[in-house]
Image: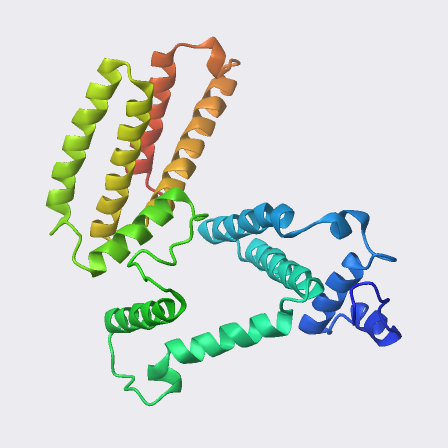
Amino acid sequence: MSPSSPLPSDDEELIRDPEGGMGRLVAIMARLRDPARGCPWDIEQDFDSIAPYTIEEAYEVADAIARRDHEDLRDELGDLLFQVVYHAALAEEAGRFGFAEVVRGISDKMLRRHPHVFGDQSRDKSAAQQTRDWERIKAAERAERATAPSALDGVTAGLPALTRAVKLQNRAARVGFDWPDAGAVLDKIAEESRELVEARDAGDRDRLAEEYGDLMFVMANLARHLGIDPEGALRQANAKFTRRFHGIEAALAERGTRPEHVTLAEMDALWDAMKRRERDPAPTG
């Protein structure tokens, strides 16, 4: 069916069928993009304009998981799935590939990358060994596609910077370019901190930004050595800051005032009080 052709009557029935499954969603997408009967906004979109929404939906999935809001997670997963269908529809209209090829491709990849489940390899492996096997298979796949493969090939440039830093460091570590332990990374953090102070004192804005980036990169490496997800840790810190600042606002509201009408010392005192309550909550029951 070409993008400009109307949906046949059976697709109309499918669109209205609550039990239509993936076929229903694909048909809804086709209708939205139909030049004659579709949505003007959806018809105007392309890969570039939709990509930011795809990233946003992935973050909203992560947020629902962090909040343990499973009802919201169900909705956000649906939104993210719709983004996949959207990109596949755009590709199909351009004659590149369709949704069925996306599904076939990921299914084939999962079979290929899990020989201990779907092949003849032993299933008696640790999770760590399975992770190493997964990365080895991925590296072989990249080597087949690349003319001059690099250990860093395949680390997407569009990833969040902290996530990409960890992935780059993991790739380099596989070929032996890594600090021996977290202690060595902490020493490097001290060095980078000194260089940041020097750049600040020199008043060199470009160097200051560079040194700050170096410090962040090493902090990401520390997270990797400690087995911490830096994005997740920062999300938790953001949530903690938000919770405590809301507490400051609530405490001040009880006094009939607002943050901008009190001193920093007063707000610091409320912040410290909330920290103590979080560490030593009042007994219940």
Image position of 210 with respect to 141: above or below: above
Q: Quadrant of residue 9?
A: bottom right
Work out which residue is located at the far bottom of the displayed protein and give it: 120
Tell whether 74 sits left or right of 125. right
Q: Is residue 246 above or below residue 153?
A: above
The relative height of residue 243 versus residue 132 in the rendered view (above or below) is above
Q: Position of residue 146 (x, y in %)?
A: 38, 64
Quadrant location of residue 97?
A: bottom right
- Rendered location of residue 47, percent (x, y): 62, 52
Residue at (52, 74) in percent of width and height: 105
Residue furthest to the front? 147
Residue drawn at x 35%, y 44% as measured from the top left = 162
Instruction: Name the residue located 63 percent from the left edge and 49 percent from the top edge.
Output: 50
User: 127 left or right of 163?
Assistant: left
Residue 133 horizontal side relative to residue 11, left or right: left
**Residue 214 visible, this angle:** yes
Visible in this render: residue 285? Answer: no
| Colour convention of the picture | rainbow
Number of numbered discs on residues: 0
Image coordinates of residue 173 in percent, x first then y, are 21, 56
Pick whichever, 113 or 237, lies toward us.
Answer: 113
Q: Nearer the viewer, residue 80 or 212?
A: 212
Q: Position of residue 211 (x, y in %)?
A: 26, 29
Task: Write the residue at 46% across / 48% down.
Answer: 158
Quadrant the N terminus occupies = bottom right
Splitting the image into 4 quarters, where does residue 283 fall? top left
